[in-house]
Amino acid sequence: MTTPVDLAAVLATFQEPWAPRTVATMNDYDIRLVKTVGEFTRHAHPDTDEFFLVLSGCLTIKMDSGDVDVHAGQVYVVPRGVAHQPVSVDGAEVLLIEPSATVNTGDTPSELTAPRRVV
């Protein structure tokens, strides 16, 4: 990286939900931005934890052990192998940190499976 990344500027370049954009890499990890609205595919990542930082709005992460509401300015990590379903009724903007090879729908491919997009 030669210049800082303006997260708000990147978020302004797209509207489609559940289509993450990689804004930076760190070692073998992507820093991704995603807009969310509605329900995402229930899935798990068998080999990695998943880091969520909600920038705006509220994201509910549904899990068998109970739902977790993550509000703007809050962080939550879903442990590897735990089935979860992100949901955002009113929409949220979220920063994710995960290995670069991680597929957004984990072990459950669906119509919401997105290619890796680097901006």
Image (spheres, grey):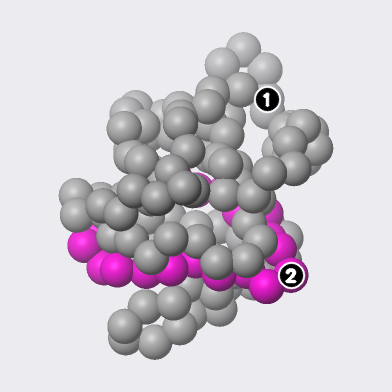
Q: Is residue 94 visible?
A: yes
* Distance between the alpha carbons at the discs numbered 1 and 2: 29 Å
SS at badge 1: loop
Apparent side of residue 28 relative to residue 5 in the rendered image (left or right) = left
* Magenta segment, prevailing SS (helix, strand or loop): strand
Q: Quadrant of residue 65?
A: bottom left
Marks 1/2 in contact by CB < 8 Å: the verdict is no
Residue placed furthest toward the top: 2
Residue with the mark numbered 1: 4
Percent x, y of residue 116: 46, 29
Region rendered in magenta: 79-97
Inspect the image, locate mark 1, and give the three-letter code of the amino acid beneath it: Pro
Which residue is pictured at 66% across the width and 61% down the height? 37
Q: Quadrant of residue 29?
A: top left
Q: Nearer the viewer, residue 90 or 94?
A: 90
- Image quarter of the C terminus: top right
Q: Is residue 24 visible?
A: no
Residue placed furthest toward the front: 111
SS at badge 2: strand
Apparent side of residue 71 relative to residue 78 in the rendered image (left or right) = right
Which numbered dot is residue 51?
none
Percent x, y of residue 80: 24, 59
Residue with the mark numbered 2: 90
Q: Earlier in the sequence, mark 1 or mark 2?
A: 1
Q: Nearer the viewer, residue 29 or 117?
A: 117
